[in-house]
Amino acid sequence: MQKMRPLGVTILVILEILSSMLFLLGGVGLMLLDNFIEPQILDIPELQYLTELGIIQLIGLIVIILSLSSLVVSWGLWTGRRWGWTLSLIFAILGGLSGIISLPIGIGNLVLNIFIIWYLLEPHVKAFYGFGFKPQPKSQSELLSSSISSMVYCTRCGAKNSIDDNFCRRCGALLKKANNS
Ligand SMILES: [Zn+2]
């Protein structure tokens, strides 16, 4: 697809990359912070120490993974990939849901993601990702009838030929196309 990238997509991708970078730093920060607070936790019973240590690291790791996958999705969105559009929509829906869960603080998150969902569903944006302009996939019966109507019978020998043929495959007679009349 060599279509012009919609301006909103460019803005969206830049914002996504910036926020992904921030979250990536946050995730790395969580894992580093873990090392800094380690000496203080040593006083707490061993099990609790391990659990808390693991959870902090896990959260840091999840944030890093989410940030990296968000960067990949941004790249897909930027280059006009269908999966980039689809995953962005899923991310926006999940983001909106997390906004609903964390209301009223999450109101900004909710509004932003509803806007992103609305924008991604805009016809010209969908068209950029190759949605909407493709003909509907044919059903089995439509395919069958179209293959029947694309057949032409030779008037000399009666052999069945494709509508694309100009001469009979069996006898070589010039085929008269029924759909021309
Ligand atoms: Zn023939």
Image (cartoon, grey):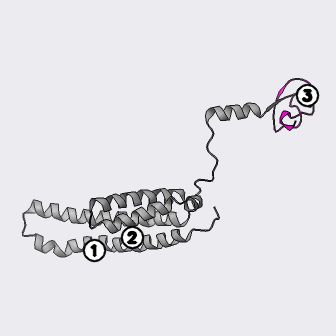
Q: Which residue is mark 3?
A: 171
Task: Decide whether residue 101 is among the magenta residues.
Answer: no
Task: Decide whether residue 171 is among the magenta residues.
Answer: yes
SS class of the residue under badge 1? helix
For image coordinates 92% across by 31% down, the residue present is 172
Which one is nearer the viewer's eye here, 81 or 120? 120
Under mark 1, the amino acid is Gly
For image coordinates 16% across by 60% down, the residue present is 51
Where is residue 118? Give x, y as percent: 47, 61
Which quarter of the rendered image does ligand 1 occupy? top right
Q: Earlier in the sequence, mark 3 or mark 1?
A: 1
Q: Are marks 3 and 2 in contact (CB under 8 Å)?
A: no
The CB of the residue at mark 3 lies under 8 Å from ligand 1: yes
Under mark 3, the amino acid is Cys
The CB of the residue at mark 1 lies under 8 Å from ligand 1: no
Q: Earlier in the sequence, mark 2 or mark 1?
A: 2
Which one is nearer the viewer's eye here, 73 or 115? 115
Q: Height in image: 59 above or below 176? A: below
Q: Is residue 20 left or right of residue 162?
A: left
The CB of the residue at mark 2 lies under 8 Å from ligand 1: no
Query: Mark 3 or mark 2: which is in front?
Result: 2
Under mark 2, the amino acid is Ser
Q: Quadrant location of the C terminus? A: top right
Quarter where residue 62 is shown: bottom left
Q: Height in image: 161 above or below 104? A: above
Where is residue 42? Give x, y as percent: 10, 70
Q: Is residue 109 left or right of residue 144?
A: left
For label 2, the crowd category at 10 Å Cα-Cα, with few meaning under 14, some 14 to 19 and many 20 or more, is many
Q: Which residue is mark 2?
A: 20
